[in-house]
Image (spheres, rainbow, N blue to C red):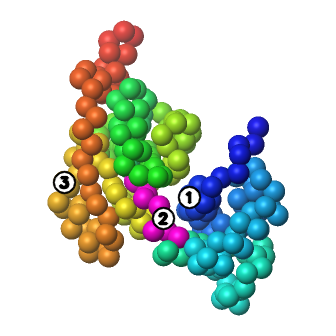
Amino acid sequence: MVKPLNPLDAQIRAIFLAEIRHGSASAQTLHDEMGYSAEVWRRILSDLLRDGLVRPLEPQAAGQNKVTGIGYVLTEKGRSMLKVVLTGGVFDIIHVGHVSTLEEARKLGDILVTVVARNETVQRLKNRKPVNDEETRLQVVKALKPVDLALLGDPQDAYRIVRKVGPDIIALGYDQKEDEQSLQKALKRMGLRTRVVRLSSYIPGVKTSRIISLIREEQ
């Protein structure tokens, strides 16, 4: 069942997500992901173009209010209407602690983008292979209600996704080892105005390593 037509803020949200997934948003990609006809999205994009909220990727289309099949991205004005939150983790065995952390992160903004660590990153940081491979973990995280978009991380460049998303906030889990001040300085060097926050979603006795240990004891 198709949901009622989204208001302006939800349209901007849909375009941002399509832009991150595909590099730009077209009437066709928005139709494929949101369920409305491409013609409806062409009218929406035309209105947003007129209001200066999106711009075409192809220069020759600039200034035109007639939307074609080319891709569009948010302008600075359009992007300013959203508060985007970025968080990340391994998410090997999903438990209530993960859900609580993601719910808390989602409350900080309009969109939650979640980065799932690659297998080799898990091996390097935790000195063990993940129980579930990266594609399985990615699909599980995508299915979680607080998550608007889940992406696999880059094992070679930890900041690639950060630069791509350009989040307003990076939300660190209560037990993640990253130092807030060091991360904030790195973001500033990249020219990002991203704010770093530490979440306080600790739930006593709930930890992936403990769950794994208990499972092994039962075997």
The answer to if 84 sits in the magenta stretch is yes
Residue 45, horizontal then vertical, whole percent = 70, 69
In magenta stretch: residue 47: no
Give the residue at mark 1: 9
| Quarter of the figure with residue 130 | top left
**Residue 185, disc:** none
Q: Secondary structure at mark 1?
A: helix
Report x, y in % for residue 174: 24, 40
Q: Nearer the viewer, residue 125 or 101?
A: 101
Left or right side of 126 for 179? left
Distance (Cα) linking label 2 and label 1? 7 Å
* Mark 3 Cα shell of 10 Å, populated few (<14), some (14-19), many (≥20): few
Looking at the picture, which amino acid does disc 1 mark?
Asp
In this rendering, the answer to whether 165 lies above or below 32 is below
Residue 53 visible at all: yes
Find residue 179 and name its label. Answer: 3
Q: Secondary structure at mark 2?
A: loop
Q: Which residues are magenta?
A: 78-86
Q: Looking at the image, is mark 2 or mark 3 earlier in the sequence?
A: 2
In percent of the image, x 49 and y 68: which residue is there?
A: 79
Query: Badge 2: few (under 14), some or many (20 or more) residues near its Cα, within 10 Å?
Result: some
Dot 3 falls on a residue whose secondary structure is loop
Q: Residue furthest bottom?
A: 60
The residue at the point 53 percent across, 47 percent down is: 148
Residue highlighted by disc 2: 81
